[in-house]
Amino acid sequence: MEIRIFQKGFNFSQDGPGNRLVYHLQGCNMHCPWCSNPEGLAMHGGTSYSTEELMDEILRSSLMFFDGGGITLTGGEVTMQFDAAGELLKAAHSCAIHTCIETNGTHPRLPELFPYIDHLIMDVKHYDPEKHRETTGVSCENTFRNIEKAAKAGKTLALRIPLIGGFNASTEDARHFSDLFQRMHLKGYATLELLCYHEYGKSKYESLNLPYLMDDTAFISDETLHAFRDILADSGMTLVST
């Protein structure tokens, strides 16, 4: 089966534990205006590999998977190439390679991949499905369902909130996130990382002749970040940094 990839390479501890071979899969079902990988949004583009070619590369690279490392599939959005990603994850898992995916969690069939995923990273961009849809084009209701299913399945679950000024980064937003996680009963089942807005991908938009719609109001202050962290920590979530 073929997989389209727009970037690959090693990364230590930022895309799952240890030293990891990270594959960025082409295509995404969202259009987050702060996306740092706009070259991965469209389904076309990237380079096509067979799952056999990638497994050969993974096995040849296995000596580099130190400190609990392995492979990570990210994007774009991994589940846009659901069947191919599943085939690769299953093959790697059968060879005792530690597997991880980073996903927005919206695909209704995501739990089918759980048996082949050792570490699951999921974005939680907003607590309000309609506001989420207005900004990204997709509701987050499936994300909430899949988070709860992952917790019940005993997956090693890492949640991430990209903090964007004017979208989800106020203290009121933090309280709503806190309420959401408490309703999901995630204490003890998931870690949480707060990712502050950055514009590292801005030059990519220019090179692709795409408009960059973000402005300085998206940045958040250290004071805002600390207040957000304090509210989430009070909810019982385990906050981490990578």
Image (tube, rainbow, N blue to C red):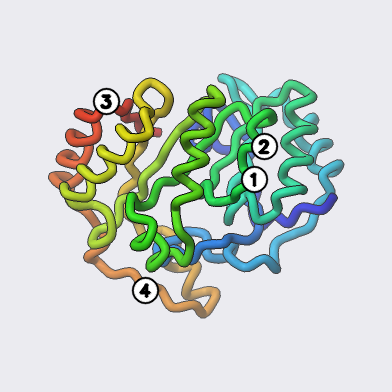
Secondary element under disc 2, as helix, strand or loop, is helix
Q: Residues within 10 Å of mark 1 (few under 14, many from 20)?
A: few
Q: Residue 194: image x %, image y %?
A: 32, 41
For residue 213, which numbered disc appears in the image? Answer: 4
The image quadrant of residue 176 is: top left
Of 103 and 23, the residue lying toward us: 103
Q: Residue 182: image x %, image y %?
A: 30, 32
Which residue is tagged 1?
109
Q: CA distance from mark 1 to mark 2?
A: 8 Å
Q: Residue 196: image x %, image y %?
A: 31, 49
Q: Are marks 1 and 2 in contact (CB under 8 Å)?
A: yes
Question: Nearer the N terminus, badge 1 or badge 3?
Answer: 1
- For image coordinates 37% across by 73% down, the residue present is 213
Question: Nearer the N terminus, badge 2 or badge 4?
Answer: 2
Secondary element under disc 3, as helix, strand or loop, is loop
Total labels drawn:
4
- For image coordinates 18% across by 52% down, the residue present is 170
Q: Amino acid at mark 4?
A: Leu
Which residue is tagged 3?
236
Q: Amino acid at mark 1?
A: Arg
Question: Nearer the N terminus, badge 1 or badge 4?
Answer: 1
Of 197 and 114, the residue lying toward us: 114
Q: CA distance from mark 1 to mark 3?
A: 29 Å
